[in-house]
Amino acid sequence: MKKYIGLSIIALGMGLTSCNDFLDKLPDNRTEANTVEKVQKLLVAAYPTHDHMAFTEYASDNVDDMGANNPYTDRFLDQVYSWMDVTETDNQDPESYWMDLYQCIETANVALEGIESMGGATTTTLKEMEAEALLCRAYAHFMLVNVFAMHYNANDPDAIGVSYVTASEKELNPQYERETVHENYKHIAEDLEAALPYVGDSYYDVPKYHFNKLAAYAFATRFYLYYEKYDKVIEYANKVLGTNPKTMIRNNQHIASLSRDPDVVSQYYINATQSDNLLMLTSYSKQGVLCGPYYTGKRYSHNAYIGTNEDISAIAAMWRGTYASYLAQVARYSGTNLNVWLRWTVPALFEYTDPVAQIGYYHAVYSAFTADEVLTNRAEAYALLKQYDKAYDDLTTWVQNTVTVNFQNFVVTKDVVENYVGAMAYSYDDETGMASTLKKHLHPKFTIDEEGSEQENLIQLILAVRRYETLHIGLRWFDIKRWGIEIPRRTMDGSGNPLKITDWLKVDDVRRAIQIPQKVREAGYTPNPRPDSSDDTDGALIPDNFLIKD
């Protein structure tokens, strides 16, 4: 099951030299981390400069295929949307993200060894630096295993994960084995728990671009939610949110006062002075273009049908509102080859490398962790521990902070959720598989109460709220994986309604694990399994009744 590969080719080789040149000698141009100042500068490079947002967002149920007549696509998006193994080169592709994360791990390991060479973390500053390095290493591995492996399953200790690297490379082409997901999670927990007591903000120039205290706790809430350790989710969420969560989550009242300009609104979303933004990251990314207003149309979109039936207006119906009842107004665009509902949360920033030739790169700045996500993590943990009143309180906090003045006295209660979510049909329960609602069948690998129960209704609402909060930044994909949500690939007709289903991602479909990058597989790394078209159990086949309106 386990293969080996020299991750030096993957991590250090990116952007340094050609593969053939790299094999000639081991480059050693790293900063020698033997002073506090050098370690501090080194750790700046321990954060990813590529992201998963495009390939996980377009793999999720947040987009539909608007039809072959829509010309606004490319081969990369076609592959991602279709759950194909990505072969196209793009700054936002899985290979770029894989290589970048392993480079972050190498950098963190060099920093840790540098601290050790100075006699260990004997001062407050060195302890905080050691904590930052451990957090960067844990976060990079956490994202790798959650992107490139199946989701953590407590009952499957043999599921294959990724390589967990804890030492810098000192030889050409060292060999690493691919661990299990369980082993990955164990190592992440060890790094995280070793860091949390010492993480601090004292030596950061701009704390929000580093693992500051609140960002570290926010990371812990997401990790332990995925790890099914719900008491710890609550423990660390409380450290983030304090006694008055309203002071920590996004200031939607201010967003409502801004001009209806995508640049103005999106720049506010990434403002590092805002309390809800806990860790800011920058990346070579067109996500502000792909999921923003800077285009003339696109084939795969978060369209009016999804916005009306599955998330934005579907959630608002709970308080008897519509898309217009959100303080942060939804941008709706329609026209020829254009059908999209957007939230302006990711700016499109262009850096010119040659202003005369008008050549350069798109960048994105985004919040990797927000207090708003932490609030939904805590609500879900409360729901799973059956502390329902506390979960209702967190949802009430979210609603009252999100809606316009006419709805700000709305309170989420058991009766509200039962009468709203409980009375709702499940998506795809009709004979054609086309009907959509906020609610989808859940198939987690852990046990929850039966469908229609108080617990299940509450979880459905929490997942919908998180879907809204994380729209366009790719986190919905991880909820789909961990909750076993089955989703179709729908082609829409000219009026924006479902025409036919062309594929179906079932609960155990192996395509839920993004394929290991092609260059890495070619170097000998074990690939993730892929469906056999002759085998129904692999999830590649579509029930006959889901193919309609040819």
Image (cartoon, rainbow, N blue to C red):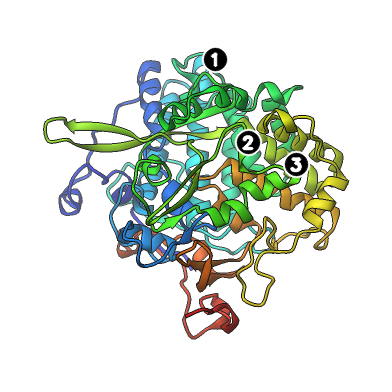
Q: Which residue is mark 1?
A: 124
Evaluate whether residue 308 shows in this view: yes
47 w.r.t. 244: above or below: below
Q: Which residue is mark 2?
A: 326
Work out how far the residue at label 3 is from the one at label 2, CA to CA, in angstroms.
Answer: 11 Å
Q: Residue 104: give x, y in percent of width and height.
A: 40, 38
51 on left or right of 544: left
Q: Nearer the viewer, mark 2 or mark 1?
A: 2
- The amino acid at mark 1 is Thr
Q: Could you tell me if the residues under marks 3 and 2 are in contact, i.e. CB atoms within 8 Å?
A: no
Judge by depth and name the residue closer to the eye, 131 or 264.
264
Q: Which residue is mark 3?
A: 319
- The amino acid at mark 3 is Trp
Q: Residue 543: give x, y in percent of width and height.
A: 58, 81
Give the residue at x 51% y 52%. Answer: 145
Q: Residue 82: give x, y in percent of width and height.
A: 43, 66
In this view, the residue farthest toward the left is 356
- Image quadrant assignment for residue 254: top right
355 on left or right of 49: left
Evaluate whether residue 456 shows in this view: no
The numbered mark, 1 or 3, whose residue comes first in the sequence reads 1
Q: Nearer the viewer, mark 1 or mark 3?
A: 3
- Image quadrant assignment for residue 287: top left
Dot label at residue 37:
none
The numbered mark, 3 or 2, whose residue comes first in the sequence reads 3
329 on left or right of 249: left
Work out how far the residue at label 2 is from the one at label 1, CA to CA, in angstroms.
Answer: 44 Å
261 w.r.t. 511: above or below: above
Judge by depth and name the residue closer to the eye, 478 or 355.
355
Give the residue at x 47% y 30%. Answer: 260
- The amino acid at mark 2 is Tyr
469 on left or right of 84: right
